[in-house]
Image (cartoon, helix red, strand yellow):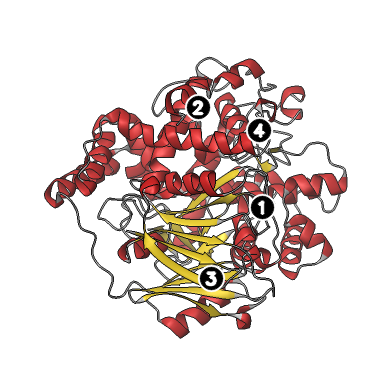
Amino acid sequence: MKIVRINMSKGTVDEHDVPKEYQGLGGRALTSTIVGREVPGRCEPLGPRNKLILSPGLLSGTSAPCSGRLSAGGKSPLTGTIKESNAGGTAAQHLAKLGIAAIVVEGQPSNGALQILHLSASGAKLVAADELKGKGNYETVAVLLDKYGQKCSIISIGQAGEMRLSAASIAVTDPENRPTRHCGRGGLGAVMGSKGLKAVVIDAEGGKRLELADSKAFGEAARVFAAELKKHGVTGTTLPMYGTNALTNVINEAGALPTRNFTSGHFEGANKTGGETQREIIIERDGLPQHACHPGCVIECSRIYHTNKKEYLTKGPEYETVWAHGANCGIDDLDAIAQMDRLEDDFGVDTIETGATLAVAMEAGLAKFGDAEAAIRMVREIGEGTALGRVLGCGAAVTGKVFGVTRVPVVKGQSMPAYDPRAIQGMGVTYATSTMGADHTIGYSVAPNILKVGGDLDPLKTEGQVEASRNLQIATGMLDSAGLCLFVAFAVLDSPAAFGAIKDMLNAQYGWELSDDDVLAIGGKTLAKERAFNKAAGFTSADDRLPEFCYTEKLPPHNKVFEVSDAELDELFVPVEEKYQE
């Protein structure tokens, strides 16, 4: 395997074998390790000393089920912390086929010119791309596929990334060559834009099949893993049937669905936007109610959403997107939500951050809650680069400051996702202590609190929440490093056989002899490195807190506040740093 280094200041491309200090790493473990070693903690995120790293996971490029995640890493312009954000699509598998463990983009062009990076079996090269300036992801992808071939995979940014807006995302093409899969959170699209890199074109034709140390053992472990995913209730039935949006009605019934900028945990229009209704609409319009976002996915929780004229509009939309633009904005129109999802994918902004920002803007009086037309208009302004659009495109925290809003649902500058921490105390622990700002994917405490997967905790009580979040954050660090979809965690948490299959696949692929503890250590060491970077960047335990309103405003219908103490939050990473700090 090799690392491709792109120096945008010099316009040079260098390919070299993975150095010793990065060997045995992939995905989030590799992106966070490179950031920790090579990026100064106090650097300007949009300056030349920050780096953008793109890395497939350890299992990417193999037949391991659900192993097609691509990790993007760097210092976040949204939070100032370290950041890893991952997406499905075809890029990770294509990079692995070319033997690329990571792309490291460093430096900054002095002339503001745009370029693309073209990768193929014959090597890597930079190509001028000024003709793509100002184009959205959909048009950018269409132009590049016409030029380089329909079998290529594309990683790209839209207008938001070019404008360096701190909520900008990085798009990855799906199996239908649409830019629908996004490394969304943390503003890494702005980092890519600051490097003058509009897109990465990956032509895997002629690439080599990955060599496995023990192909027979790997195949058997992969079959076991697929079987465990198929038989689990969440990964084998619920997600394939209703997608991630199965959660809308579940979380609403739990009184934890943030509504109208986190003023309530219950939305009266939830059923109109839930997964059951969404499935009916998709089928009625000849869309796809079950779809794989990347090759090798056996869960297939993605969807394809059509207009009422039965024409393609967007993917999903996913649960977080539906919530952010739905309940959180008081909107119960799935078509309006899907239209915003399409626009945001095209402009290249994180749908979670943008939906949370729209709700803050509504709180400020820029529009009324429930006004879908006004919400769509504000999203369009982001792509147009108006003064208001640039404010909105920099996220909820910036928007709250500009318009004097005090209820701004962010941690370390990143918006809280679709689970109110007052009604699911464990998610509050994860939001507060995450190395990357409020992030549900880094330690999905909804599993034991609401879904009763991997444990059974009372979501309204504090007991057991810190330990559960810690264990989930370690496990998630491992899954992100392996390139596995987060959703496999449901089976892994309930099935020792599923966890064992991951260990067996890693051992069979690389000729390792990892124990269970060794596998988890991949995640633990990654978290420790991320914490070390954040300390170098100036963060302390005082930053591991929820916004003030979570402690002072009681959330209906449970009338609860967040009750986990500061002392308990400060203890979460103590065992991690003691055990895994290098």
In the rendered image, residue 472, in percent from the top left (x then y), is placed at 45, 31
Discs 4/2, front? 2
- Counting residues from the start of the chain, the first of labels 4 and 1 encountered is 1
Image quarter where the C terminus lies is top left
Q: Would residue 498 be found to the left or right of residue 473 on screen?
A: left
Kindly identify which numbered label has been placed on residue 469: 2
Answer yes or no: do the residues labelled 4 and 3 have beta carbons within 8 Å?
no
| Mark 3 residue element | strand
Q: Would residue 229 be found to the left or right of residue 124 on screen?
A: left
As shown in the figure, which amino acid type bears the numbered disc 1?
A: Pro
Closer to the camera in the image, 105 or 554? 105
Query: Residue at point 65% right, 63% down?
Result: 194
How crowded is the residue under tag 2: few (<14 C-alpha within 10 Å), some, or many (20+)?
A: many
In the rendered image, residue 522, in percent from the top left (x then y), is placed at 38, 37
Q: Which residue is mark 4?
A: 265
Q: Which residue is mark 3?
A: 199
Q: CA distance from mark 2 to mark 3?
A: 36 Å
Q: CA distance from mark 1 to mark 3?
A: 19 Å
Kindly identify which numbered label has been placed on residue 45: 1
